Amino acid sequence: MLRDITLGQYMPGDTVVHRLDPRMKIILTVLYIAIIFCVTSPLWYIVPLCYLLFASKMAGLMPAHLIKAVKPLRFLLILTFILNLFFSSGETVWVHWGIIKITQEGVFTAIHFSMRLIFLVAGTSLLTLTTSPVALSDGIEMLLKPLKVVHFPAHELAMMMTIALRFIPTLIEEADKIMKAQMARGADFESGNLIKRAKAMVPLLVPLFVSAFRRATDLAMAMEARCYHGGEGRTRLRVLKFIPADGWALVITTFALLATIFLGKWL
């Protein structure tokens, strides 16, 4: 399961999506999220689906990569579906047995919110899969740069987000090693009920937290030894520049957003 987590992982490439300006990719991700929240019916998820497949094709990614990003959330998806299925009100009753009542509106609501969560995770994973942590940090900082007039710590916020994303794969790998070491010593993480499985995770979480704090201390000392003092006077190896492909990507995404709004409002 740990190997299926793709958040924070970067897949190097030389595709059109990889060459897009990181600022534009962040803007496109925000517009994509707007597309998801503008969908009013499960039927109209065909628009973000086509957009997602087109973007993944242009990025050289297989649909399996997007499915892998959603796979760790399967329990959350099941919980979301069940809660919306049984606790959504509606008039057209399909099943009524005691306190259990399933309505047509509840079924559509459960499908709708489950699909929304799937598309959100799959779409936003394209950002980290096609953008290096350094480029992502530069893009976030440049987008937040106008807020410096109100003394907003744009560079520090971008640095914290980048470090967090950078260390997610490292912590996943560390957790996998600790889990295998514990299993070799007889630990069982999969059998038993939910409470027993939660208790079995304690021998995993304690060394993982110790390792995370040790890595954070080493990183802080390394940054201090290299005289890191924030973004003041900082220069960049690669200057961010918009290319024609950024404009075309913005046009396509805006068209998808307008199409979603039109479908939800008039059809």
Image (cartoon, grey):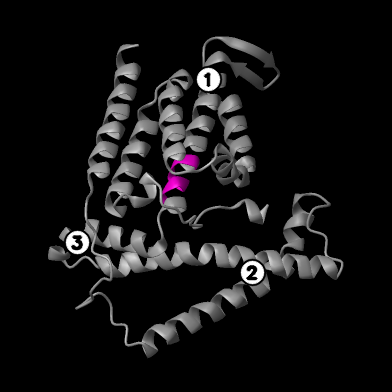
Q: Quadrant of residue 75?
A: top right
Disc 2 marks which amino acid?
Glu
Cα separation between marks 2 and 1 = 40 Å
Disc 1 marks which amino acid?
Phe
In the picture of the structure, the residue carrying the numbered disc 2 is 174
Residue 178 in the image: above or below residue 98:
below
Residue extent of the magenta highlight: 122-127
Q: Secondary structure at mark 1?
A: helix
Residue 126 in the image: above or below residue 164:
above
Circle nearer the N terminus (2, 1): 1
Percent x, y of residue 6: 55, 52
Q: Dividing the image into 4 quarters, which one contains the C terminus?
A: top left
Q: Secondary structure at mark 2?
A: helix
Which of discs 2 and 1 lies nearer the camera? The answer is 2
Cα separation between marks 3 and 2 = 35 Å
Decide if residue 34 is on the left or right side of residue 72: left
Tell me if mark 3 has few (under 14), some (14-19) or many (20+) residues whose alpha carbon lies within 10 angstroms of its own: some
Callout 1 touching callout 3 (CB < 8 Å): no
Examine the residues drawn in magenta and state their main secondary structure: helix
In the picture of the structure, the residue carrying the numbered disc 1 is 108
Most foreground residue, 152 or 237: 237
Tell me if mark 1 has few (under 14), some (14-19) or many (20+) residues whose alpha carbon lies within 10 angstroms of its own: some
